[in-house]
């Protein structure tokens, strides 16, 4: 038995030979190299060790709670087998893209994918379903995933270990290119009256669910309120295109506020009834708790959302960003003024990344609070960047947003290369003309802009479909891990040089 993935390699079916499709050959070579990196770098062993620690800690907690727990023997072996599949299936999903449902179908179709993910492939093919794949994507928290990424960085920065795996050269960790961006949250554009519509819809959906499961209170049919809020939303949307739109919008908002109060009262009555009489329904207590949490979340914010809409539309007063509700469902998103041509303002979280010359992302941070200015962010992360490179980092290149007097002085004190793009145009022209190394580093910085796009659009599908900051943070960690494996698998390998010799001859 393999100590890593729990199956006998000698009994694995041989992959069929496929000719005539270059793309398949390239994908197979990519996955074979990623497999070698996972095993040879110690990344998979680290992932399993962290999974085992989590499994044993949860077993202790359940025992203390009085539950019967099987934490050893077959239970542990089964958990480790699923842990290995969690790592491989989620990495594969990030590499090929798509939804959990699509990934499950691909695993059923493809012997190559099943072999990479260590799925059972004997008389009966058994692959994880979409719900299991979703569980796999949340196997470890974001902090543990950062430890896994750091394990890969240390291994690939070691010359001997990198060459044992098969790479021609180890990672060059001496220079870093840094940038920041906004990771947009999967929310509606935060228009004030849209918050009211969303709140009403959520309350009505919860009320309908409670009524469907056998608990009813006197009220009009929820569908009538749903129709009313939809009609008001369409009226509000169309009011801006008519003469006297300001007066019309105020009139519609007053009607929306009145309807919100009525629905809110019904929601509160149903919330109290469900909490008290849930045994009269066919719901379990955990299922009832899910509905109660949804109601509490919206009922707690709807009065503030009404006041915000009133202040902005009727009172025509600005609301400070720190007090503004951007979404009823995502509390930890910020207003980020980017000044881009495509989006002057974005709504999400600041993301900091630092990459090597090869494009390997060795440091990142997703900010829960409003992100500090780029210059301060670099200053706060620089010591950690040095630590993650094992003290090899000796220079950094950025755009002009990261430039500051304190940062320049800090790099000078460390005797590190200063590739910060100066804010003053005259100073920039002078350095580009007189410093060839600086000019080359700034030309290379264009690739960092592309790296941001690749990470967000290819590995995160634009914006991660994840609720809550912790889940978005975890999706970023998985995306960076898969991205780094993809970068390493496409680096020059020793076998490429050997294969090229006869062709050159």
Image (spheres, rainbow, N blue to C red):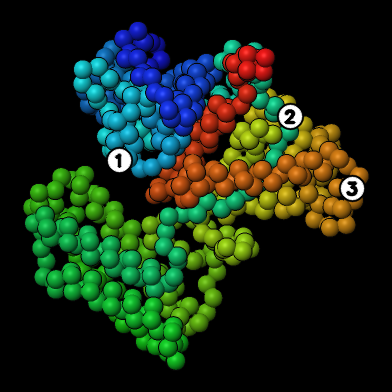
Q: Which mark is residue 174?
A: 2
Structural crowding at the residue carrying mark 1, measured as other residues with C-alpha within 10 Å and reported as few (<14), some (14–19) or many (≥20): some
Nearer to the camera, 364 or 431:
431
Which quadrant holds residue 135? top left
Disc 3 and disc 2: Cα gap in Å?
A: 24 Å
C-beta proximity under 8 Å, tags 1 and 3: no
Which quadrant holds residue 438? top right
Total marks placed? 3
Secondary element under disc 1, as helix, strand or loop, is helix
Depicted 133 relative to depicted 115: above or below? below
Q: Is residue 442 left or right of residue 325?
A: right
Quadrant into which the C terminus falls? top right
Which label lies toward us, 3 or 2?
Answer: 3
Secondary element under disc 2, as helix, strand or loop, is loop
Q: Is residue 207 left or right of residue 333?
A: left
Secondary element under disc 3, as helix, strand or loop, is helix
Q: Which mark is residue 311?
A: none
Image point 57% across, 59% down: which residue? Answer: 336
State the residue position of label 1.
101
State the residue position of label 3.
433
Image point 42% across, 59% down: which residue? Answer: 187
Image point 29% across, 53% down: which residue? Answer: 293
The x and y percentages for residue 115 are: 36, 21
Structural crowding at the residue carrying mark 2, measured as other residues with C-alpha within 10 Å and reported as few (<14), some (14–19) or many (≥20): some
Disc 1 and disc 2: Cα gap in Å?
A: 41 Å
Image point 77% across, 40% down: which residue? Answer: 441
Q: Is residue 101 left or right of residue 387?
A: left
């Amino acid at each position: 038995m393999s100590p890593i993935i729990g199956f006998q390699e000698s009994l694995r079916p041989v992959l069929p030979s496929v000719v005539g499709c270059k793309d398949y050959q390239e994908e197979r070579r990519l996955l074979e190299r990623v497999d070698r990196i996972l095993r040879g770098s110690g990344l998979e062993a680290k992932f399993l060790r962290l999974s085992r620690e989590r499994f044993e800690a949860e077993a202790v907690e359940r025992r203390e709670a009085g539950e019967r727990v099987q934490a050893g023997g077959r239970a542990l072996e089964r958990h480790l087998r699923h842990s290995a599949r969690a790592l491989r299936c989620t990495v594969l999903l990030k590499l090929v893209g798509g939804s959990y449902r699509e990934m499950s179908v691909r695993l059923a179709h493809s012997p190559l994918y099943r072999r990479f993910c260590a799925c059972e492939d004997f008389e009966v093919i058994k692959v994880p379903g979409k719900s299991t794949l979703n569980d796999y994507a949340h196997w470890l928290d974001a902090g543990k995933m950062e430890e896994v990424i750091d394990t890969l960085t240390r291994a690939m920065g070691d010359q001997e270990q990198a060459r044992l795996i098969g790479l021609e050269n180890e990672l060059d960790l001496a220079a870093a290119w840094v940038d920041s961006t906004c990771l947009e949250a999967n929310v509606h554009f935060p228009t004030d009256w849209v918050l009211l519509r969303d709140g009403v819809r959520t309350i009505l959906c919860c009320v309908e669910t409670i009524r469907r499961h056998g608990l009813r209170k006197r009220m009009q049919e929820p569908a009538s309120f749903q129709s009313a809020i939809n009609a008001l939303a369409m009226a509000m949307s169309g009011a801006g295109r008519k003469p006297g739109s300001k007066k019309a919008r105020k009139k519609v908002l007053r009607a929306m506020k009145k309807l919100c109060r009525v629905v809110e009262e019904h929601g509160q009555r149903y919330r109290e009834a469900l909490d008290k009489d849930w045994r009269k329904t066919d719901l379990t207590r955990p299922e009832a708790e899910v509905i109660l949490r949804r109601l509490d979340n919206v009922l707690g914010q709807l009065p503030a959302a009404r006041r915000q809409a009133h202040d902005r539309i009727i009172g025509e007063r600005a609301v400070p960003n720190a007090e503004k509700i951007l979404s009823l469902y995502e509390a930890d998103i910020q207003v980020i003024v980017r000044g881009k041509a495509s989006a002057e303002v974005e709504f999400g979280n600041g993301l900091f990344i630092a990459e090597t010359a090869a494009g390997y992302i060795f440091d990142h941070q997703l900010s829960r609070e409003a992100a500090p200015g780029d210059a301060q962010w670099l200053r706060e992360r620089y010591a950690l960047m040095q630590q993650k490179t094992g003290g090899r980092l000796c220079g950094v290149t950025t755009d002009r947003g990261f430039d500051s007097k304190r940062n320049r002085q800090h790099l000078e004190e460390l005797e590190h290369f200063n590739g910060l793009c100066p804010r003053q145009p005259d100073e920039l022209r002078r350095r580009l003309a007189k410093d060839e190394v600086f000019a080359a580093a700034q030309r290379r910085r264009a690739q960092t802009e592309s790296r941001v796009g690749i990470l967000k659009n290819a590995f995160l599908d634009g914006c991660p479909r994840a609720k809550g900051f912790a889940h978005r943070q975890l999706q970023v960690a998985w995306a960076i891990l898969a991205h780094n494996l993809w970068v390493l698998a496409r680096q020059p390998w020793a076998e490429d040089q050997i294969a090229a010799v006869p062709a050159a001859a």
